[in-house]
Image: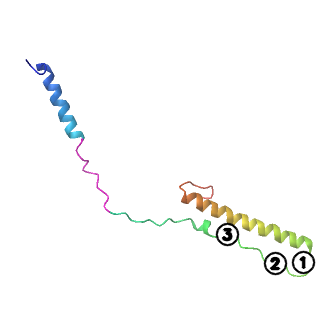
Amino acid sequence: MTLMHPNRWPIAALLSIACSTACSPDPELRLMTRIEPVAMRHPAALLDCQPEPPLPPPPRSVAAALAWIIESRAAGADCRARLACIRARQDGAGCAQD
């Protein structure tokens, strides 16, 4: 009683050779042995906000006060947008200001 047909031995030998070499480690791969922290760097443009505008000198007109309020709100919106961009970069997403 034979275990295998005689013509199947070469196929079985080739399959066992292929399986034994497929599991060998790649010589180019190296095991990582330590973890090094990498500092995240943000573009300098994202780290500076628009400055708050100076108060208009007295006597202040209503138009000057309103212009100051508009400029102050624009500076705040600019700063919030830059901080949102930094948060998005830290979460792995990009932002339009990159």
Residue at horizontal 87%, vertical 73%?
65
Q: Are marks 3 and 1 in contact (CB under 8 Å)?
A: no
**SS category of the residue bearing label 2:** loop
Residue furthest bottom as drawn: 58
Residue carrying label 2? 55
Label 3, label 2: how many angstroms apart (C-alpha)? 18 Å
Q: What residue is shown at x 70% (from left), y 70% (from top)?
A: 50
| The C terminus - image quarter | bottom right
Q: Which callout, 3 or 2, points at the residue further toward the start of the chain?
A: 3
**Residue 6 forms part of the magenta stretch:** no
The three-letter code of the residue at mark 3 reads Cys
Q: Which residue is mark 3?
A: 49
Residue under numbered circle 1: 60
- Name the amino acid type tagged 1: Arg
| Rendering quarter of residue 74 | bottom right
Q: Quadrant of the N terminus?
A: top left
Asked if residue 95 is positioned above or below residue 12 in the image, the reply reads: below
